[in-house]
Amino acid sequence: MAGQKKEPAAGTHLDPAAERKFRPNQEDLAILARFRPMDDDFMRCMFKDNLPLVEYVLRIIIGNEKLTLIRAETQKDMKRLVGGRSLELDVYAGDIDGRKYDFEIQRSDKGAGEYRARYHSSVLDVENLSAGDNFRDLPDTVMIMLTETDFFGEGKALYPVAEVRVDSHEAPELFTGNINDRLTGKQFRDGRYILYVNGAYDNNDTELGKLMHDFRSSRADEMYHSPMAERTRQLKETEKGVEEVCRMIEERCRQERQEGRQEGIMSSVRILMEKMGFTVDAAMDFFNIPVEERERLKAGL
């Protein structure tokens, strides 16, 4: 039963019937046993093709029991800006009222800064306005950043950036003159919302506090919310779930190896360019880099 504490198990295990059919790599099982919903790879597995769970979690975070999602997808690529920095959203969702949501897990404070939130929010705008559309066609967007630590350090569960007041602060230094005398006090609402969630919030007397506890838990039996516990149990204790997560682990390791190989190649290309005066194409010719890989490597130089 979710919410009831039990003695921790030695590690992740399958039921006997499943274990006879599938014996995953023991190293993968050890990694799987430590995974928590706070770990973005595991979180993506939890929410993949699981609209009800995404809706359940967002309802608690936002505090709106009537929130109704009509779509949700994980690892959504946002690449509409040619030449711009692309993003892969952890969870991209839309509700019945047309709002768009970006739900991100960020364990490192370094990657959770205000400018990152701003860029995520901006990309949501670009994704949802096509050529010829009126600017008023922009949907309301909600960018949610769940951080493992208390990013702002004030002990609060939530830090919303819901609206801006024209006189909310003194004018920036780049403005000169008596601009502060002209502030109106009106609200500036553009339908853009940013919400930071404190993943370290520790108050199990609230639903949000229990949810943050669940995000930090590696065992289903330690979780309070049954939808979170059931999905965790499915991924860790059934054949299909373990296979899904183990494939994800293997794919991530493959990508890391590939990225490491690419970084080594790019480093060698840079040396030829800087020390020997090679052009980028001549350097790539020297290393026999396939044509289909060159543009991608050039973008990283």
Image (cartoon, rainbow, N blue to C red):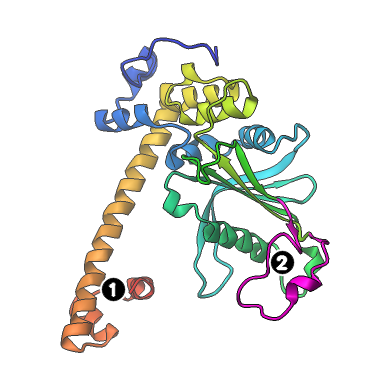
Residue 184 magenta: yes
Residue 172 horizontal side relative to residue 109, left or right: right
The x and y percentages for residue 34 are 36, 29
On the question of residue 50 being in view, the answer is yes
Segment tinted magenta in the rendering: 162-188
**Mark earlier in primary sequence (1, 2):** 2
Q: Position of residue 182 (x, y in %)?
A: 80, 73
In the image, is 20 to the left or to the right of 197?
left
Callout 1, which amino acid? Pro
Query: Principal SS element in the magenta part?
Result: loop
Residue at which label 2 appears: 129
Residue 99 left/right relative to 271: right
Q: Is residue 77 above or below residue 22?
A: below
Q: Are marks 1 and 2 in contact (CB under 8 Å)?
A: no
* Residue 247 locus on image (x, y percent): 37, 39
Front position among marks 1 and 2: 2
Secondary structure at badge 2 equals: loop
Q: Residue at x 28, y 84 (%)?
A: 281
Q: Which residue is mark 1?
A: 290
SS at mark 1? Answer: loop
